Amino acid sequence: MRQPAKTFQDLVVWQKAHQFILLVYPFTAHFPKSEIYGLTSQFRRAAISIPANIAEGFKKKGLADKGRFLNIAQGSLEECRYYLILSNDLEYGDTSELKIKLEEVSKLLTSYANSIQNSDS
């Protein structure tokens, strides 16, 4: 049995989300300069939002508050999923590794959110 997380950094879902953003930065660094205030900025903002909201939700006391922040993280994850589709369609780079990482975060985040939600019952 795993020990309960003492900090958000102990959460595997946060660790994987952090790894994802560390891949997004170099990937978007190669986007055209014309995208600096467009797709580059939007993609990075959405990607940062995933681990940031996991971290913020971790310290919330009520289950409803925790769930709300995890839901925001899930929304940002889906936004990133679209940005990967768009980046691929615009031929801005190979998105295959990022898609795999994002899917891993998605599954972990869904499991974590469900476990928080079900701890209420």
Image (cartoon, helix red, strand yellow):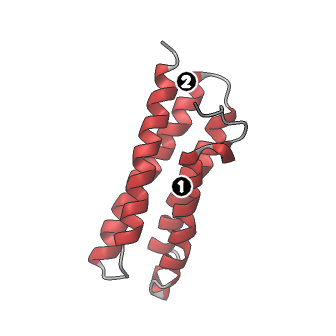
Is residue 48 shown left or right of residue 38?
right
Q: Nearer the viewer, residue 14 or 53?
A: 14
Q: Position of residue 5 (x, y in %)?
A: 67, 36
Read off the residue under disc 2.
64
Answer above or below: position of 25 versus 17.
Answer: below
Give the SS element for disc 2: helix
Q: Residues within 10 Å of mark 1 (few under 14, many from 20)?
A: some
Say which amino acid is labelled 2.
Ala
Q: Residues within 10 Å of mark 2 (few under 14, many from 20)?
A: some
Q: Position of residue 6 (x, y in %)?
A: 72, 36
Give the SS element for disc 1: helix
Circle on res. 16:
1
Q: Position of residue 40 (x, y in %)?
A: 49, 74
Is residue 32 shown left or right of residue 4?
left
- The residue most toward the top is 121
Q: Name the residue located 52 percent from the left edge and 75 percent from the top edge.
A: 37
Give the CA separation, mark 1 to mark 2. 24 Å
Q: Name the residue located 58 percent from the left edge and 58 percent from the top edge.
A: 18
Quarter where residue 99 is shown: bottom left
Quarter where residue 45 is shown: bottom right
Q: Name the residue located 53 percent from the left edge and 55 percent from the top edge.
A: 16
